[in-house]
Amino acid sequence: MTMEALVHLPRDEQRQRIGEVLYSQIREVHPNMAGKLTGMILELELEDLLEVVHKKDKRDKMVKEAMDVLQMHY
């Protein structure tokens, strides 16, 4: 998935496609929280989302930050 592949799609569809990929990646590690974590991370800008999808270290960092936020509020 690249910016070039997404640029011609409507914004909602861009996020939908990225969300599907991101959800499957997160579900491997956090199956019970994948939906909530994905939704939180999808608030990022498109460029940042692509980096999260393609770079495991960035994804792990964002997932940890989202988990920390959830733990503070629940």
Image (cartoon, rainbow, N blue to C red):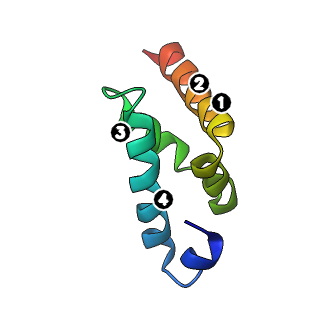
Q: CA distance from mark 3 to mark 1?
A: 17 Å
* Residue type indicated by callout 4: Ile
Determine which quarter of the picture holds residue 66. Answer: top right
Residue beneath the point at 38% across and 44% down? 24
Residues tagged 3 and 4 counted as in contact (Cβ below 8 A): no
Q: Quadrant of the C terminus?
A: top left
For label 1, count other residues whose C-alpha is less than 10 Å away and answer few (under 14), some (14-19) or many (20+).
few
Asked if residue 49 lies left or right of residue 10, the reply is right
Q: Earlier in the sequence, mark 2 or mark 3?
A: 3
Mark with earlier residue (3, 4): 4
Closer to the camera in the image, 35 or 70? 35
Q: Earlier along the polypeptide chain: callout 2 or callout 4?
A: 4
Q: Secondary structure at mark 4?
A: helix
Quarter of the image that includes the N terminus: bottom right
**Residue tagged by mark 2?**
64
Binning the other alpha carbons within 10 Å of mark 4 as few (below 14), some (14 to 19) or many (20 upward) gives: many
Given this view, does label 3 or label 4 mark the residue nearer the observer?
Answer: 4
Residue 61 image offset from top left, x and y in percent: 65, 30
Decide which of tag 4 and tag 1 comes sooner along the chain: 4
Depicted 42 relative to depicted 62: above or below:
below
**Please, what is the three-letter code of the amino acid marked with disc 1?**
Lys
Residue 35 circle label: 3
Under mark 3, the amino acid is Gly
